[in-house]
Image (cartoon, rainbow, N blue to C red):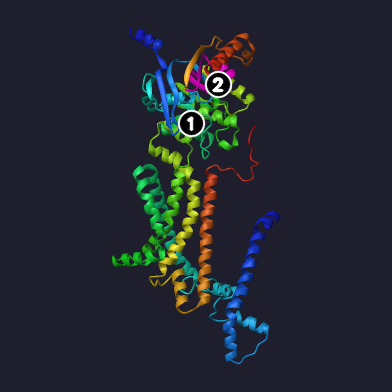
């Protein structure tokens, strides 16, 4: 790692992380202290301020677990357990990931299809967009249980209903982004296609879709995070036996706050990974499509 | 017998023929007469320049030929067909003000674009790409992306793209307008060379009097509000034109006539 990366990337990120951890520790002490004080008074325990501080950070069911408690739980439930064990967060993340991925793929495909329809068919342009926007104003928490129950009634269970919730959340950013992307070519580029007497299909594949690629990846970053939220929410109402959502629910039932926080962190890490993967794919595709290299040393002849 | 007919037909054959052509745009500020009563014949092999101030309809006229705008009155034929039929028959290549290259395609892929759309075979595409790259002196730049080329080279690539398929008519809308004087001189020279080698008919829109006089066999002077043709000048310059021809009295005389025509059609006191 060279000095510039250190100064421009590592240092700012590190500063924020340290600030967050500091605030977290202070909040953990402040929130857990009243209960600890209560406990000590009943048990007639007197402790030095340092001992007291340590105890607020070591409760089994704290109101706000300290960062190291969450980290320890996360470590125990990922590294120390078999991946197949149903106490392993890796296993639960994998379950959530599978429905996230399926939902994301279906959502992206649906979003692109809707966008192509809207750009090419005037009636769809007028009629579809209000419905699409309306669909997103319905809280997903309200619609998820109904989708699961209705599909369960017709014997569709397991992965698909969860993936459909992800699809429901992820198609929207893709559709909106792709409509903009498919309409992004300059007048002059479209005129050029017209002078060639190109068909609508040729214009779509040779001009509109390539021009929309940057828009697609920007929307896919939003969509993949939304898919994960969808998958987790879909696991909540069904009493799902596995997945990050079921871990959150189980933690809530038994007041296992440390478990809840560990599951939350696991979900965030998963989201960050997914967004990073989409970002990497965007960069690779961008390079394959002849984007300028960032160094800009490669020649521009006079 | 049949030969005689075809010769006779060739003689009267105009590539572009407009009679009483008019085009009115309806805007929020009322109708704008972009073209009014335009009569013009362009013969096969002509190099015709359209010159005039902004808003005189020269670009609009080119776009009407290309079926990118619809005239509101009068008639026009391109290769003996309506502009729409001519466009569908891929009768012309169009070079825009900007190079309009697709940034995600290399130069050779950009040139391949019309060939792909028109269904040329891979082998023929390759053959044509290398031929037109040579024609515009860009051999060796086929694998570069547009951003790796200078503005002049990009514009040459866009000319190559318009030459790649078999259209006898080349429509050029201020193709060198954004380039500096030296590059423009150079490209003008190359364009003349290309014209004499390919025998195409060229319609060329420009702002520049020297450019128009240097390039053309026929100069159409236009004036705005409403856009109309005020003068058509047939150049007496020889076909062989070194850059130095621009210093000759003959050249200056034609340039003078163009300037007079522009002045007559357009009063700046308005």
- For marks 1 and 2, the one nearer the N-term is 1
Q: Label 1 lies in what chain?
A: B
Circle 1 Cα neighbour tier, 10 Å, few/some/many (<14 / 14–19 / ≥20): some
Instruction: Kindly indicate whether the residue at mark 2 contacts the one at mark 1 (C-beta within 8 angstroms).
Output: no
Q: Quadrant of residue B255?
A: top right
Q: Quadrant of the N terminus of chain A?
A: bottom right
Circle 2 Cα neighbour tier, 10 Å, few/some/many (<14 / 14–19 / ≥20): some
Secondary element under disc 1, as helix, strand or loop, is helix
For discs 1 and 2, the disc positioned in front in the rendered view: 2
Q: Which residues are magenta?
A: B198-225
The numbered disc on residue B191 is 2
- Residue at position x 56%, y 12% in the image: B257
Q: Label 2 lies in what chain?
A: B
x, y (%) of residue A227? 45, 60
Disc 1: which residue: B126
Secondary element under disc 2, as helix, strand or loop, is helix
């Amino acid at each position: 790692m060279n000095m510039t990366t250190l100064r421009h990337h590592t240092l700012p990120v590190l500063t924020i992380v340290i600030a967050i951890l500091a605030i977290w520790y202070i909040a953990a002490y402040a929130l857990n202290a009243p209960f600890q004080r209560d406990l000590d008074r009943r048990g007639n325990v007197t402790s030095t301020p340092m001992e007291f501080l340590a105890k607020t950070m070591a409760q089994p069911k704290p109101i706000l677990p300290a960062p190291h408690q969450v980290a320890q739980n996360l470590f125990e439930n990922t590294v120390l357990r078999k991946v197949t064990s149903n106490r392993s967060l890796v296993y639960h993340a994998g379950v959530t990931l599978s429905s996230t991925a399926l939902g994301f793929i279906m959502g992206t495909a649906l979003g692109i299809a809707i966008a192509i329809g809207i750009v090419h068919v005037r009636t769809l342009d007028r009629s579809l967009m209000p419905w699409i926007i309306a669909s997103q104003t319905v809280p997903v928490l309200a619609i998820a249980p109904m989708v699961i129950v209705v599909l369960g009634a017709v014997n569709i269970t397991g992965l698909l209903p969860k993936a459909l919730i992800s699809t429901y959340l992820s198609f929207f950013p893709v559709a909106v982004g792709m409509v903009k992307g498919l309409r992004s070519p300059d007048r002059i580029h479209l005129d050029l296609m017209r002078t060639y007497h190109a068909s609508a299909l040729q214009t779509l594949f040779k001009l509109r879709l390539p021009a929309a690629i940057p828009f697609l990846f920007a929307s896919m970053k939003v969509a993949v995070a939304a898919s994960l939220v969808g998958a987790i929410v879909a696991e909540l109402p069904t009493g799902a036996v596995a997945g990050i959502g079921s871990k959150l629910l189980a933690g809530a039932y038994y007041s296992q706050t440390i478990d809840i926080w560990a599951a939350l962190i696991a979900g965030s890490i998963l989201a960050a990974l997914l967004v990073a993967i989409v970002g990497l794919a965007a960069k690779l595709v961008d390079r394959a499509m002849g984007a300028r290299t960032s160094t800009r040393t490669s020649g521009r002849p006079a | 017998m049949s030969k005689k007919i075809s010769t006779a037909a060739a003689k009267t054959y105009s590539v572009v023929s407009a009679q009483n052509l008019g085009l009115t745009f309806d805007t929020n500020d009322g109708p704008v007469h972009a073209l009014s009563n335009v009569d013009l014949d362009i013969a096969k092999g002509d190099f015709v320049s359209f010159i005039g101030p902004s808003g005189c309809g020269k670009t609009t006229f080119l776009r009407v030929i290309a079926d990118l705008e619809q005239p509101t009155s009068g008639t026009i034929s391109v290769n003996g067909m309506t502009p729409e039929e001519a466009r569908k028959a891929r009768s012309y290549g169009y070079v825009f003000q900007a190079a309009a290259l697709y940034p995600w395609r290399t130069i050779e892929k950009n040139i391949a674009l019309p060939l792909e759309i028109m269904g040329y075979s891979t082998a023929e595409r390759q053959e044509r790409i290398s031929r037109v790259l040579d024609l515009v002196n860009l051999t060796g730049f086929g694998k570069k992306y547009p951003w790796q080329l200078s503005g002049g080279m990009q514009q040459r690539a866009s000319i190559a793209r318009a030459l790649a398929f078999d259209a006898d008519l080349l429509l050029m809308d201020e193709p060198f307008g954004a380039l500096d004087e030296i590059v423009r001189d150079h490209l003008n020279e190359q364009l003349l060379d290309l014209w004499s080698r390919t025998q195409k008919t060229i319609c060329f829109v420009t702002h520049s009097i020297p450019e128009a006089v240097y390039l053309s066999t026929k100069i159409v002077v236009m004036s705005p509000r409403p856009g109309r043709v005020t003068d058509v000048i047939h150049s007496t310059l020889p076909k062989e034109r070194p850059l130095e021809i621009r210093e000759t009295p003959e050249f200056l005389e034609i340039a003078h006539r163009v300037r007079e025509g522009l002045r007559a059609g357009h009063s700046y006191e308005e």
